[in-house]
Image (cartoon, rainbow, N blue to C red):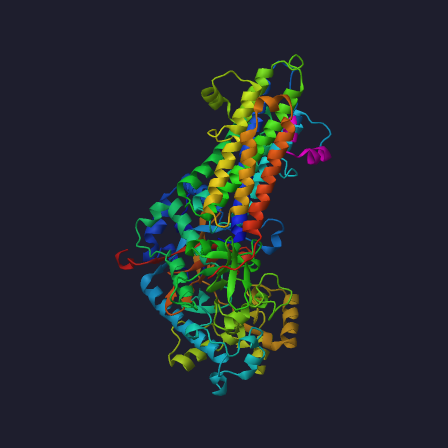
């Protein structure tokens, strides 16, 4: 049975490729025709080729619960998500606006805290932030930028509006899969690309390198950039090595680095110690420097904070940047944008209830079955409650958690995430998606073209995290929409 | 270049070389058996000694017959030197090196590992074994070809070659030691088909054809030894490996200690008289070669992998 879009059932939600009554959107017409004409056998062969490509390219990720198997093949769905360029341009502006404001905010928090003094941001949220690092107060990173790499999750609700669901300002991952997805798709489905002007995605590594180079303490020299990884057992190790390779940077582990008596950072090379200018660190704040944070950390580098505070090494993202991706802070981002930039947010926030506020907490507790509850400081979809899919005992457990520690919880309406046709048992079926673009800020601002599209491959599921069984799609930002 | 990366490249190359050497050894041995009348088999035991894994083998198997030895050397993951284990180690290291390796190289190595893991356990019988070994050799050669054709001749490349050639010389010395001990120790009437056995040694190192082309005498013990240890043109001779190692070291920084070790070893080889050694002292001589390789490894390790001095930034 070949793929057949006549049977495609969009729910009453927004579908990115197909309108009601199974009519492809103009931008998706050529793609849907191509897939329908492919035939069952041909499609099967392509899928096999795709799996071989993913396996042989070694595109893998780690699921911590998966025991000894440290690399599972990356799940890629062959039907791409398509975004018209005109829509993307506006989203891009919104994302740049957002990161600019967030960086002004972080810099302010570790400096004068003017926004708190002016009453635009409540002191108690700051006081209870688990990601505020007092060790960073007074530090002055280059350009006042703390979050150089930001991954913001976008979702589309049933009315077609794109919302920012969350910002990841600590060590966001996924960009390598975005790049690899495109490579695999070009290898396996070259004809799919024939009818489209698809914007390339592969300038990300050089933009990332430029961003990192811009914060080098020795701007006159060619910067020595290193990617600091926790090592091969980390779920994103593939990405760490991938980015290091693409940038021509060194991939280092904590023990490869040492801070000298001159408070500069060196790496151990075959010729002895050699100075490092910028570290793109992919380990969490807590493990960065055992002298300052977690004393038992063997992943980090003793003295690294000293070197950073003295301006002898650039750290991306800067320690403490995570203060702004706390989910309680998220609720204030529209205000933050207005406060620092005097502009209205271009891409809206999802309405968010703060359990620290009495009235909002009572509302949340009364509506647990309809809302999504998230802890303020977790990422990766761990520890959250999806109301409509929850059991009574789960809701009771969360009610208790919220009452015990209201500041640590926020709630949002259950969004009806938009869908994209995805290949399930040989035919196209509607599956929920989100989109994670990556935004870079150093001396310049850059946004990836599209981003990593994650898809919940189980029917009806809204959980797209790859660590929880989600898949991914290639994302096309398409320029020739009017000619299609 | 990071010390850790240099060390990983060195070991990855060693494991890759080992997998191919083992495949060649097994094919040569299997082939030689077919040329001997039944009942005249020389033992599979020798292969266990060559690979230096006697202890591991005996702790698992009580009988060293063809089936057990082949399984142990090809597919047994309990043997750290089996083909599957070697490729698995090489791939595990390559995973930590993906940022410095050519993408094509990684893909080929990954494919080779996936092939070995799946096919080796089913390729123990004689019928499938030959082809499976050929595939391993071919896969490894493809990896080498990609390295040769796409990798810059930078420091990483030197460590890759250093690993490859020191492993190869090591294997050559092991094969010479084990096989010739059997051959030289016996009177010729005790060991019929002596000729076939010397040919087998050459074939284990894919040296038969080159020997015939370059030595011009019929296969004779001392000449075979000379060819495998002292010939400077044949790529699997002990000396050839040493020469390549010193080329690598020559372009690496702070190479004095390692080059001194190599120089001493090379002089020892140049002075040796194979006709004399063939009648007496070969085993002790090969021991010396092995010790020399050990010293070389130690020198490389202290100089490049475990040092900690500052250079001007």
Residue A463 position, x and y percent, is: 53, 60
Q: Is residue A472 above or below residue A290?
A: above
Residue B36 position, x and y percent, is: 60, 15
Question: What residue is drawn where x is 56% and y is 60%?
Answer: A254
Q: Quadrant of residue A370?
A: bottom right
Q: How many marks?
A: 0
Q: Quadrant of residue B75?
A: top right
Q: Residue at the far top: name it.
A: B189
Q: Is residue A479 above or below residue A309?
A: above
- Magenta stretch holds residue B54: yes
Find the magenta span and give its range.
B46-60
Q: Is residue A134 above or below residue A316?
A: below
Majority secondary structure of magenta residues: helix
- Magenta stretch holds residue A135: no
Along the line of sight, the residue nearer the viewer: A407 or B69:
B69
Res. B269 in view = yes
Residue B288 position, x and y percent, is: 62, 34
Res. A10 in view = no
Left or right: A454 as drawn, with respect to A287: left
Question: What residue is drawn where x is 30% and y is 54%?
Answer: A197
Question: What residue is drawn where x is 60% and y is 56%?
Answer: A64
Q: Is residue B68 above or below residue A428?
A: above
Along the line of sight, the residue nearer the viewer: A164 or B217:
B217
Q: Residue at the far bottom: name it.
A: A118
Left or right: B143 as drawn, with respect to B276: left
Residue A32 position, x and y percent, is: 36, 50
Along the line of sight, the residue nearer the viewer: A419 or B163:
B163
Left or right: B146 as drawn, with respect to B61: left
């Amino acid at each position: 049975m070949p793929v057949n879009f006549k049977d495609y059932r969009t729910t009453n939600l927004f579908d990115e490729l197909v309108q009601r009554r199974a009519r492809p959107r103009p931008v998706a017409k050529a793609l849907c025709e191509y897939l329908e004409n492919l035939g069952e056998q041909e499609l099967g062969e392509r899928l096999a080729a795709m799996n071989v490509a993913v396996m042989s390219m070694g595109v893998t990720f780690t699921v911590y619960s998966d025991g000894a198997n440290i690399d599972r093949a990356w799940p890629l769905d062959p039907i791409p998500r398509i975004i018209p360029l005109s829509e993307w341009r506006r989203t891009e502006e919104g994302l740049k606006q957002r990161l600019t404001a967030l960086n002004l905010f972080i810099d302010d928090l570790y400096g004068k805290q003017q926004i708190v003094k002016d009453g635009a941001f409540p002191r108690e949220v700051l006081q209870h932030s688990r990601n505020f690092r007092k060790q960073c107060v007074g530090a002055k990173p280059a350009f006042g930028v703390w979050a150089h790499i930001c991954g913001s999750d976008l979702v589309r609700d049933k009315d077609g509006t794109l919302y920012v669901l969350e910002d990841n300002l600590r060590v966001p991952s996924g960009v390598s899969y975005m790049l690899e997805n495109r490579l695999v798709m070009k290898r396996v489905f070259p004809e799919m690309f024939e009818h489209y002007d698809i914007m390339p995605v592969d300038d990300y590594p050089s933009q990332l390198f430029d961003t990192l180079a811009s914060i080098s303490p020795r701007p006159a020299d060619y910067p020595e950039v290193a990617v600091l990884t926790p090592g091969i057992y980390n779920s994103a190790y593939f990405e760490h090595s991938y980015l290091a390779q693409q940038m021509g940077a060194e991939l280092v582990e904590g023990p490869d680095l040492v801070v000298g008596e001159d408070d500069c950072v060196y790496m151990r090379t075959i010729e002895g110690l050699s100075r490092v200018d910028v570290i793109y660190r992919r380990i969490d704040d807590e493990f960065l420097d055992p002298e300052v944070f977690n004393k038992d950390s063997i992943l980090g580098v003793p003295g690294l904070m000293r070197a950073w505070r003295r301006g002898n090494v650039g750290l991306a993202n800067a320690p403490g940047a995570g203060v702004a991706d706390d989910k309680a802070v998220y609720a204030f981002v529209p205000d933050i944008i207005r406060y620092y930039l005097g502009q209205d947010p271009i891409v809206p926030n999802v309405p968010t209830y703060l359990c620290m506020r009495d009235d909002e907490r009572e509302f949340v507790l009364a509506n647990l079955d309809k809302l999504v509850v998230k802890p303020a400081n977790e990422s990766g979809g761990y520890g959250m409650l999806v109301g409509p899919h929850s059991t009574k005992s789960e809701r009771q457990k969360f009610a208790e958690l919220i009452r015990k520690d209201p500041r640590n919880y926020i709630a949002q309406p259950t969004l009806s995430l938009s869908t994209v046709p995805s290949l399930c048992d040989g035919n196209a079926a509607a599956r929920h998606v989100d989109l994670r673009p990556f935004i870079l800020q150093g001396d310049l601002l850059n946004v990836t073209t599209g981003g990593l599209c994650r898809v919940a491959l189980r029917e009806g599921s809204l959980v797209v995290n790859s660590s929880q069984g989600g898949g991914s799609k290639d994302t096309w930002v398409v320029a020739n929409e009017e000619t299609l | 270049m990071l010390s850790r990366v240099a060390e990983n490249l060195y070991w990855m190359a060693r494991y890759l070389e080992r997998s191919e050497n083992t495949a060649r050894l097994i094919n040569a041995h299997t082939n030689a058996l077919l040329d001997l009348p039944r009942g005249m088999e020389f033992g599979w035991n020798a292969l266990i000694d060559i690979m230096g894994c006697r202890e591991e083998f005996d702790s698992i198997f009580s009988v060293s017959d063809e089936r057990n030895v082949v399984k142990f050397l090809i597919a047994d993951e309990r043997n750290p030197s089996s083909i599957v284990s070697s490729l698995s180690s090489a791939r595990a290291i390559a995973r930590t090196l993906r940022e410095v390796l050519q993408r094509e190289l990684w893909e080929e190595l990954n494919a080779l590992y996936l092939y070995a893991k799946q096919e080796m356990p089913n390729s123990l019988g004689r019928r499938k074994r030959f082809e499976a070994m050929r595939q391993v050799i071919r896969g490894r050669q493809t990896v080498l070809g990609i390295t040769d054709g796409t990798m810059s001749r930078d420091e990483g490349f030197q460590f890759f070659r250093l690993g490859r050639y020191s492993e190869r010389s090591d294997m050559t010395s092991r094969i010479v030691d084990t096989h010739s001990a059997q051959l030289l120790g016996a009177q010729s009437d005790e060991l019929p088909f002596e000729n076939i056995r010397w040919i087998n040694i050459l074939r284990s190192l894919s040296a038969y054809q080159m020997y015939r082309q370059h030595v011009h005498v019929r296969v004779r013990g001392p000449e075979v030894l000379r060819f495998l240890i002292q010939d400077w043109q044949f790529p699997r001779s002990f000396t050839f490996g040493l020469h390549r190692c010193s080329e690598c070291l020559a372009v690496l920084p702070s190479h004095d200690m390692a080059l001194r070790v190599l120089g001493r070893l090379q002089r020892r080889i140049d002075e040796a008289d194979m006709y004399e050694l063939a009648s007496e002292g070969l085993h002790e001589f090969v021991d010396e070669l092995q010790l020399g390789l050990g010293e070389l490894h130690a020198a490389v390790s202290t100089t490049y992998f475990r040092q900690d001095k500052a250079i001007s930034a």
